Amino acid sequence: MSAPEGEEWTGGCLCGALRYRAAKGPVRAVICHCEMCRKVSGAPLLSFVHFPLDGFQWSEGEPSYYRSSADAERGFCPICGSTVSMKETVLDDRVQVSLGSLDRPGDVTPDDHVWTQSQLPWLHIDDRLPRYPRNSPAAPSLAVEAD
């Protein structure tokens, strides 16, 4: 998972009112199947890319935030409503941006699937990535409460 040498990672929302850049490459990327991610995205799953907070900045606009649980806020564009980020108290060293908001989403390969116990029964993805019924051992999370 790396941008071409010397290039930053960039992205933004659908309407362009929000733009961000990350000077450092991703820490990890995850595909989440939890109900909250489905609700916030309107899709059967949502992928997030974790970037170090050091070196990340909103270069255009600022997201509005919705507190989706006691330990997480989800960022969205106040104009077009695009889901762009998530902040978790337990992961305060990073920012998570929605993979689809990246200018080059194909440059990232997710590390694993989380909250597969909530995966929709008709969704079958054969990507051979590790799957976890709840959180991955690679990153703690308190964003979703256990069923």
Image (cartoon, rainbow, N blue to C red):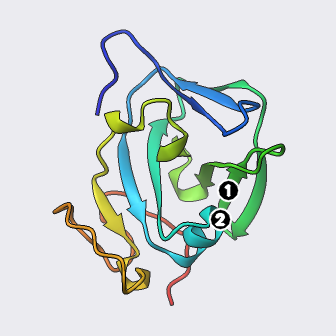
The residue positioned farthest toward the right in the image shown: 79
Q: Which residue is mark 2?
A: 40
**Looking at the image, which residue is at 61% across and 62% down?**
41
Q: Do the residues bearing badges 1 and 2 touch, measured as CB atoms within 8 Å?
A: yes
In the image, 102 versus 113, the foreground residue is 102
Q: Quadrant of residue 1?
A: top left
Residue 126 to residue 55: above or below: below
Q: Position of residue 42 (x, y in %)?
A: 61, 67
Give the secondary structure at mark 2.
helix
Residue 38 to residue 119: above or below: above
| Mark 2 residue type | Val
Q: Which residue is mark 1?
A: 74
Discs 1/2, front? 2
Residue 118 to residue 58: above or below: below
Q: Position of residue 142 (x, y in %)?
A: 54, 69
| Mark 1 residue type | Arg
Task: Give residue 91's mark.
Answer: none
Q: Position of residue 103 (x, y in %)?
A: 50, 30
